[in-house]
Amino acid sequence: NAGVTQTPKFRVLKTGQSMTLLCAQDMNHEYMYWYRQDPGMGLRLIHYSVGEGTTAKGEVPDGYNVSRLKKQNFLLGLESAAPSQTSVYFCASSPSGGAQFFGPGTRLTVL
Amino acid sequence: AQSVTQPDIHITVSEGASLELRCNYSYGATPYLFWYVQSPGQGLQLLLKYFSGDTLVQGIKGFEAEFKRSQSSFNLRKPSVHWSDAAEYFCAVGAGEKLTFGTGTRLTIIP
């Protein structure tokens, strides 16, 4: 099992550009999450999903959109990137809440 | 609202010495509690979890944690640290859909 994988690992964008981060899990987990990690701030929840076709806002959802069209995939979109979105993004999955299992992260720089 | 406090931003210990990382939480009901470890450039790995029962839980890599309801604490301990334990450690609390993470404690090991 690959667990949770994230694509891409690194990305550099210019302000105003758009991009999509892909998260895939092969553990048949119902719940999936997107976090951002910034120095000194821990992990902050952006959006999450409790099942295929569902999404919900987390702590810092502004500027991001998500979709969960397939159970195994959770996409995070930035429609118009801003320098404040420079961060490391982590995807996680969970069978039914509780312990979460994390991907390796995507380092995004917005110039 | 649930919250987690990790009062120590950075701890330095000598290799072979004992370790205790502090975690205090605020939660309205019986919490699920977790400790994660993050090595540089990596995702978060689950060290251990507490759901109910015995308040002393054992985890991977020789770590243990003790749940103390009266002190709202869930401190992580290891009797003898190894150089490979140098990493950042996150405490998390939650039940159901979402977890709340602390801001982390960075552990440095000196020879």
Image (spheres, coloured by chain):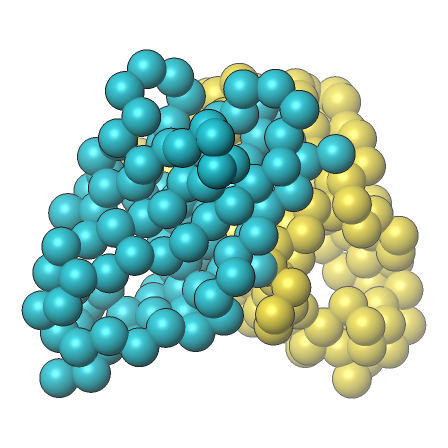
Chain colours: A yellow, B cyan
Image quadrant containing the C terminus of chain B: bottom left
Across and down, in percent, residue A32 comes to: 60, 33
Find residue B35 and report its image quarter: top left
Q: Is residue B17 left or right of residue A22?
A: left
- Image quarter in which the N terminus of chain B is found: top right
Residue at the image position 72 percent from the left and 54 percent from the top: A20
Q: Nearer the viewer, residue A59 or B92?
A: B92
Which residue is drawn at the image coordinates 19% and 68% (left, top)?
A: B84
- Number of residue marks: 0
Residue in the foreground of this view, choosing between A85 and B17: B17
A94 with respect to A58 (left or right): left
Q: Can residue A51 be seen in this snapshot?
A: yes
* Picture layout, residue B52 above or below residue A57: above
Which of the 4 image quarters holds residue B54? top left
Q: For this rendering, which residue is in front, A94 or B1?
A: B1
**In the rendering, at what x and y percent does residue B68 appear?**
40, 33
Q: Is residue A18 left or right of residue B36?
A: right
Residue located farthest toward the front when viewing the structure as drawn: B70
Q: Is residue B54 left or right of residue A20?
A: left
Q: Residue at x 76, y 60 (%)?
A: A19
Q: Is residue A100 visible?
A: no
Looking at the image, the residue that sits furthest to the top is B53
* Residue A29: image location, x then y, percent: 49, 23
Residue B57 position, x and y percent, is 26, 31
Q: Which residue lies at the image location 52% right of the left edge and 56% below the top edge?
A: B6
> Is A40 or B17 nearer to us in this picture?
B17
